[in-house]
Image: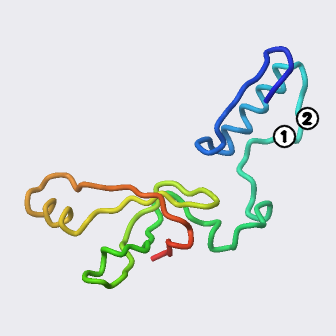
Amino acid sequence: MDGGKWGAHALSAKVSSATRLLTHWKGYVENQGLSLGPGFTTAKPSATLIPHLKGSDRDYQPGDKIAFSSPSYSGKGAHGYRPGVVVRATPKRVLVEYSFKYDIERAKKTGQPLRRHQIWKKRSEVQKR
């Protein structure tokens, strides 16, 4: 956003939600003394407005149980899928939270909280469980 009464204003689209971007845009326009009109909304766009994603790619939500490609999961040389939970999803990637088997066993034995890890994975490396 550039120009107008107050000069430039920038947001990172990579780390901002669509709602946050739209809200900032609305505020910027209104600060210029303009309006986006009565039909403007910050509601999330429907899946039909996002044609570049396949149907299965639109529905990753935080808390969804998934499995992701992990070379270390199946043991010697085998390539398996490690279970995890979706933390955040973007059009290209999914942030997954997971625990190693030894973390799960340690938590059961000691009663300590389960140690969790996070990793960004491409959508092609993730599948629903």
Residue closest to the eye, 108 or 16: 16
Residue positioned most to the top = 5
Colour scheme employed for the rendering of this structure: rainbow
Nearer the observer, 119 or 61? 119
Badge 2: how crowded within 10 Å, few (<14), some, or many (20+)?
Answer: few
Q: Which residue is mark 2?
A: 37
Rendered location of residue 111, percent (x, y)? 12, 56
Which amino acid type is marked by label 2? Gly
Q: Residue furthest left?
A: 110
Within 10 angstroms of label 1, few (less than 14), some, or many (20 or more) residues? Answer: few
Q: Position of residue 36 (x, y in %)?
A: 88, 34
Report x, y in % for residue 122: 54, 65
Q: Which mark is residue 40?
A: 1
**Residue 57 vs residue 108: left or right?**
right
| Label 1 to label 2: alpha-carbon separation | 6 Å
Between 81 and 27, the residue placed more toward the observer is 81
Residue located at (20% from left, 64% from top):
104
Relative placement, left or right, of 60 versus 95 is right
The C terminus is located in which quarter? bottom left
**What kind of element bears circle 2?**
loop
Residues tagged 1 and 2 counted as in contact (Cβ below 8 A): yes
Give amino acid for label 1. Phe
Q: What quarter of the picture does the N terminus occupy?
A: top right
Question: Between 52 and 38, which is closer to the camera in this rendering?
Answer: 52
Name the secondary structure under disc 1. loop
Q: Which mark is residue 71?
A: none
Q: Residue at x 61, y 61 (%)?
A: 92
